[in-house]
Amino acid sequence: MFIAFEAAHSTGKTTTSSALLQQLNSADNGPDKWILLPDYYRVISIELGYQRPRDIILEHPETNLTVTAMVASALGAQLQWLEHIREQGLHGIIDAGTATMLCYPQHWLEREGQQLPPYILKLAEYCSQLIDYFIYLPINAIPLEDDGVRSMDPAFQQTIDQLLQSHLQVMASPAQLLRTGSTSLEDRLAEIQAFLTPRERSQSR
């Protein structure tokens, strides 16, 4: 089973996905069966010595080239991870899912009057078809916090959320999508478990 968190920045994706990982692994006896794929953009920024993903984009004057390269590498890495975890017979949780990966480059490209290339959209669609369930976290559920990495602009957060909603309409069926309404971590986890439990039982039959 693959679960993807889909949400704009500063909505609690990493906190919730990490807590869910611990909860699901604690429920199973024996070795851990659930693996977490962290936010690709954030991880690769740190590994390459950037403070934030935005700094990668602004480094080159042709931002559209950098943005396209970033989203292609992110989706390619996600696809390889999905296929590897499936081959190992394990389960996966994606901190920032396929739809989330599309929203930020789409925003940058549209600022330049351009669109995501068809190849990127096809690759995203292929990745999303491997994901069983999508968990959407709304904006405004928790306050924005300045960590020096994520944008503090609520209008930008709302723009990303609107783009995300449009992608989820295509990628996720109503039965696959949980739109959380909880604001506390404890309540979120309970809401997610209530969503997943009957579906896990159905898949195990």
Image (tube, rainbow, N blue to C red):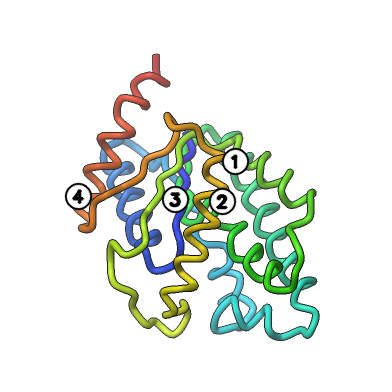
Instruction: Kindly indicate the quadrant of the structure image that contains residue 32.
Output: top left
Residue 36: where, in percent of width, then height?
46, 51
Task: State yes or no: discs 4 and 3 in contact (Cβ < 8 Å).
Answer: no
What amino acid is labelled 3 in the image?
Answer: Phe
Q: Residue 90 versus residue 127: which sits nearer the camera?
A: 127
Secondary structure category for the residue under label 4: helix
Q: Earlier in the sequence, mark 2 or mark 3?
A: 3
Residue visible at 64% across and 78% down in the picture: 48
Q: Earlier in the sequence, mark 1 or mark 2?
A: 2
Q: Residue 104 versus residue 24: which sits nearer the camera?
A: 104
Residue 184: where, in percent of width, then height?
20, 58
Quadrant (top left/top right/bottom left/bottom right) for the C terminus: top left
Task: State yes or no: discs 2 and 3 in contact (Cβ < 8 Å).
Answer: no
Residue 47: where, in percent of width, then height?
60, 75
Return the residue at label 4.
187
Q: CA distance from mark 2 to mark 3?
A: 9 Å
Q: Earlier in the sequence, mark 4 or mark 3?
A: 3
Residue visible at 33% across and 36% down in the picture: 30
What amino acid is labelled 1 in the image?
Answer: Ser
The relative height of residue 54 versus residue 15 in the rendered view (above or below) is: below
What amino acid is labelled 2 in the image?
Answer: Ala
Secondary structure category for the residue under label 1: helix
Task: State yes or no: discs 1 and 2 in contact (Cβ < 8 Å).
Answer: yes
Secondary structure category for the residue under label 2: helix
What amino acid is labelled 4 in the image?
Answer: Asp
Residues packed near mark 3 inside 10 Å, few (<14), some (14 to 19) or many (20 plus): many
Return the residue at label 1.
128
Return the residue at label 3.
5
Q: CA distance from mark 1 to mark 2?
A: 8 Å
Q: CA distance from mark 1 to mark 4?
A: 27 Å
Return the residue at label 2.
99
